[in-house]
Image (cartoon, rainbow, N blue to C red):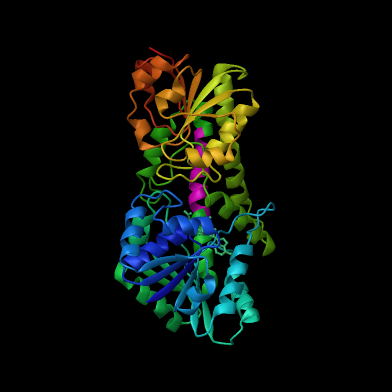
Amino acid sequence: MNICVVGTGYVGLVTGAVFADLGNDVVCVDNQAEKIDALRAGRMPLYEPGLEEMVARNVADRRLAFTTDLGPAVKRSVIVFLTVGTPSRDDGRTDLSAVEAVARGIAQAMERYTVVVNKSTVPVGTGDFVRDVIARHQRVPVAFDVVSNPEFLREGSAIEDTLRPDRIVIGAPTQQVAMTLLELYAPLERPMIITDVPSAEMIKYASNAFLSTKISFINAIANMCELAGADITQVMKGMGLDPRIGPAFLNAGLGYGGSCFPKDTDSLVQTAASLGYDFALLKTVVEINRERAGHFVEMIEKALGPLDNRVIAVLGLAFKPNTDDIREAKSVEVIRTLLAAGAAVRAYDPVATANARATLPASIVYCDSSYDAATGADGLALVTEWNEFKFLDLERLRSVMRRPVVFDGRNLWEPERMRRLGFEYHSIGRKPVLPA
Ligand code: NAD
């Protein structure tokens, strides 16, 4: 099938590569020329395990191409996917300007029946909006349909998630249109659910809001554990074994970040308000999440005293492991708060340093390893739970620090082990321990 994917970011590039791998003829479009140039030269504009190989294979087999030119890409395609960004505006509502611009471009290029599929996360009602934009801007009045096919991939395991999604949601105006998407996804042999367009749009937001709620809930319980002297890791285990609750997304820490949960929860609160519903529960979920970074830095200040001229090593900058994405990363909030309190920051991340450099203040010292970051530090703050941090030589880490004080924002290490190794160790929802 001839397919066009507009917006070559995390979702678009992975979607395009996977559909090409399934034997389709795919053109990925982006309006950032440097991104397209890099892809044509075989360089990935983002880090995602397995992506580079998959892109290279399909480019070599001529099933995958990249362009900035939307018109010809639309004209040759039966299905056009929209995978552009839908960031938050200042008021929390979703900025649909990229979706609108692309819908207009598709309308102007369309010369025959086309299925336009919205894969970007968009508020309920956007399907009608896209329909309307296309209808108003068509040069040739041909029939078209708008489908909602929300994306559930997770950065860091995006290829795997796209090849083996838990479910494929297809919100289509008719069964016949849904069949076109069913056919495309059939080789994956995964559960598919066919709904109307607004329900599909809601499924995406409701899912992200529910997962965010689980995270904020367990963080609120962690706050209580800290006050009551209980241990959140034991509480989590005890809760998670109940199959009605489950252990996923029940890890206390610094809260959710990234390019999806924060903006999607804000957006759902706003959409609810515009429909006349006060989503008080979700507002609280957002509020609890906002307090996490401040709470963590308070923990650091309480242990180290005033942070003026203190050196803090920060391990992990990406918003979660296995990605270089630092959008809405907790590291950004933590580091900004540390700097505002007068601390000096030495940071290390396995892959996100380049993105951090472009976003964070220039005063940060970026290091080549965890040991380098920890050298001379008065405290070490673990912000992203990269697997390699689990396997650090902690004795070596302690030996290079000025003061062996660790603040574990993700409960990656065991308190008793840290105590034995001679650290003062503070973590989330657990009692602090002093060196043996
Ligand atoms: P991204 O920012 O990585 O990529 C978006 C791409 O769209 C960029 O390359 C940008 O240059 C391009 N673009 C913007 N305007 C354009 C235009 N007018 N014409 C052509 N290209 C244009 O975003 P992303 O993370 O891939 O997310 C895309 C959508 O998918 C969002 O709605 C997001 O909420 C949703 N989503 C993301 C994830 C994720 O994990 N990243 C998961 C599920 C859903």
**Is 36 situated above or below 353?**
below
Measured as percent of width and height from the top left, residue 389 is found at 37, 31
198 magenta-colored = no
Compare residues 177 and 209 and report the one nearer the observer. Answer: 177
Measured as percent of width and height from the top left, residue 19 is found at 37, 67
| Residue at 44% in and 33% down | 232
Q: How many marks?
A: 0
Compare residues 97 and 242 and report the one nearer the observer. Answer: 97
- Residue 153 visible in this rendered orientation of the protein: yes
Q: Which residues are magenta?
A: 209-222
Measured as percent of width and height from the top left, residue 223 is found at 53, 33
221 magenta-colored = yes
- Residue 431 visible in this rendered orientation of the protein: no
| Residue at 38% in and 48% down | 246
Compare residues 224 and 422 and report the one nearer the observer. Answer: 422
**Is 330 situated above or below 208?**
above
Looking at the rendered image, the quarter that the C terminus falls into is top left
Measured as percent of width and height from the top left, residue 202 is found at 53, 64
Judged left or right of residue 174, residue 122 is: right
Judged left or right of residue 201, residue 88 is: right
Looking at the rendered image, the quarter that the N terminus falls into is bottom left
